Structure formats: structure tokens, C-alpha cells
Amino acid sequence: MPRFALKVEYDGAPFAGWQRQAEHPSVQGAIEAALAKLEPGEHTIAAAGRTDAGVHARGQVCHCDLQKDWSPFRLSEALNHHLKPLPVAIVDAAEVEGDWHARFSAMERRYLFRLVSRRAPLTLEAGQVWQVKHDLELAPMQEAARHLIGLHDFTTFRSTMCQAASPVKTLDALDIRELETDWGTEFQFRLRARSFLHNQVRSFVGTLERVGAGAWAPEDVKAALDARDRAACGPVCPPQGLYLVGVGYPDDPFQR
């Protein structure tokens, strides 16, 4: 049975998350249903990460096992045909070794969070960013973010429902940029790590937003981290500004 890696882009708004659910639409369910149109029967795919309801992706990666030896181009074209009109697209496909795994072979995950500061309601960007109506200061957020980089116990910044065996993780990067755009002042948070805890990125951004708004000082973020207490976390921001933008592998199957 040939195994294929798929790079997936999706708008998370109409889905209850990546993971298949019996009573709610999911991205996994949509792709498995499309696979069943190509090869009748049950299909189970595995992803690099399970995004929550409302979270988007530009570079999610999953793998599937098929009976037929498809060419990667024909496979992606056929899946995209059967995924219509859902906001899910296979942007690349590659045949991989039988022991290659979208989750366990991954070295890192990269996320982007988009936050827009503007008074007027958003129209074209609605559902794609988190909007706040007040001004934010970039430098204090950047100063606060430096306390989070490195190896830490991130108990404060993970959901109480997180199933990870340990709260200790290494955050390799947390870069924040300010962009003046036609739709407002956009702040982009780019994060990179081998793996993330449940709600870790949204907990980071919600807390850092409080710093940018002047409600917290940068050193308050370090105190929250050191507390190792979920109650010390700032507000968890909404999901619509979060994107899984890439997954890193020792041998990237999409680099030909």
C-alpha cells in the first residue's frame, strides 16, 4: 500500500477542528470522505497536529495509505475535485516511505497568529484575524515574549484539558512584527517549536496582548510563567487569528 504525504490548507471557520467527530464537521472527516470517493472503503489519515475549532492552516501535513499507485499530482487534483465546495485544499502531495508519519516524523511546527487593531468592524478580514479596538505597543510585547523563549515548564500557558505527558517544552522562536495595512494595524506573532501544548499559542497571544495594551508589564509575563499555575495566565484569545503555517521534517517530502 503506497503512503502519501499531503500538504493541506483550510479555513477553520466551518469546522469543529481537525479531528474527526461523529456529529460535527471536521477537516479530517472531509478529507477522508474525499479519499473514499477515490477508493471506496474506510480511510483513516494522521496529521502533524490537531487544530482546534476555528483555527486555520496554510501548511498542515497529513498522510494516507491507498491501494492504487497514484501520481502525486493526480491524487491532489482528484482530492481537490471531491473536496468542493468546502474551504479545504490539497496544495501538494508526495509519495513517502511506509514508515513515514506526519506526526511522529515531524521536527517542528510553525504557527502564525494575526491580530488587528482597528475601531471599525472588519469585513473582508472577518474570521481571519483577532480584532481589538484599542492601540497596542509593539516593544513591550517583544520584551515580554523573550521571557517565554527556551526550555520552560509552561503549566501556566496550557489548557487544563491538555493531554500532554509533561508541561515542559522548548519554544524556539516567538517573533512579533507590526505591519501598517489597508485594513488596520496588524501584529503578526510567529512561533516555532518541536511541539506545542493545547491552547499554548492562544494563551501566549492573549497574555501578550494585555502587555501591548498596557494592562500588564513585560515582567508580569515572567512572573506568570514562573508561577506554573493556569490561574496566572492572561485571557486566552479567540481561535480565528491562528494558522498552522508549516511543519518541518528531517527530509521534507515536498522538496523535490
Image (cartoon, rainbow, N blue to C red):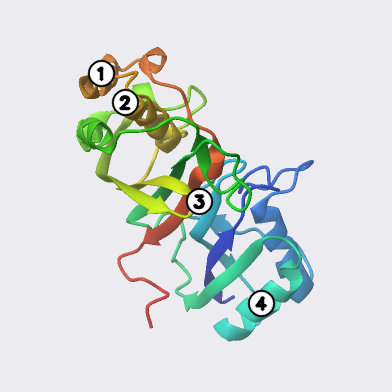
**Label at residue 183:** 3
Query: Label 1 neighbourhood size at 10 Å, few (<14), some (14-19), many (20+)?
Result: some
Q: Secondary structure at mark 4?
A: loop
Task: Confirm or deny contact between disc 2 and disc 3 (CB under 8 A).
Answer: no
Report the residue at 55% width, 72% height from top.
Answer: 91
Name the amino acid, label 3.
Answer: Trp
Query: Label 3 neighbourhood size at 10 Å, few (<14), some (14-19), many (20+)?
Result: some
Report the mark closest to the observer, 3 or 4. Answer: 3
Tell me the quadrant of the picture where the C terminus can be found: bottom left
Name the amino acid, label 2.
Answer: Val
Question: For mark 1, what is the residue?
Answer: 220
Marks 4 and 2, the one that precedes in the sequence: 4
Question: For mark 4, what is the residue?
Answer: 67
As measured in the structure, the alpha-carbon distance from the residue carrying label 1 to the one carrying label 4 is 55 Å
Task: Confirm or deny contact between disc 2 and disc 1 (CB under 8 A).
Answer: yes
- Residue 66 placement (x, y as % from top left): 64, 73
Report the mark closest to the observer, 2 or 1. Answer: 2
- Residue 208 placement (x, y as % from top left): 34, 30
Front residue (pair 162, 89): 89
Name the amino acid, label 1.
Answer: Asp
Report the mark closest to the observer, 1 or 4. Answer: 1
Marks 3 and 4, the one that precedes in the sequence: 4
Please indicate, yes or no, whether residue 69 appears anywhere in the rendered image. no
Marks 2 and 3, the one that precedes in the sequence: 3
Query: Label 2 neighbourhood size at 10 Å, few (<14), some (14-19), many (20+)?
Result: many
As measured in the structure, the alpha-carbon distance from the residue carrying label 1 to the one carrying label 3 is 31 Å
- Residue 190 placement (x, y as % from top left): 34, 49
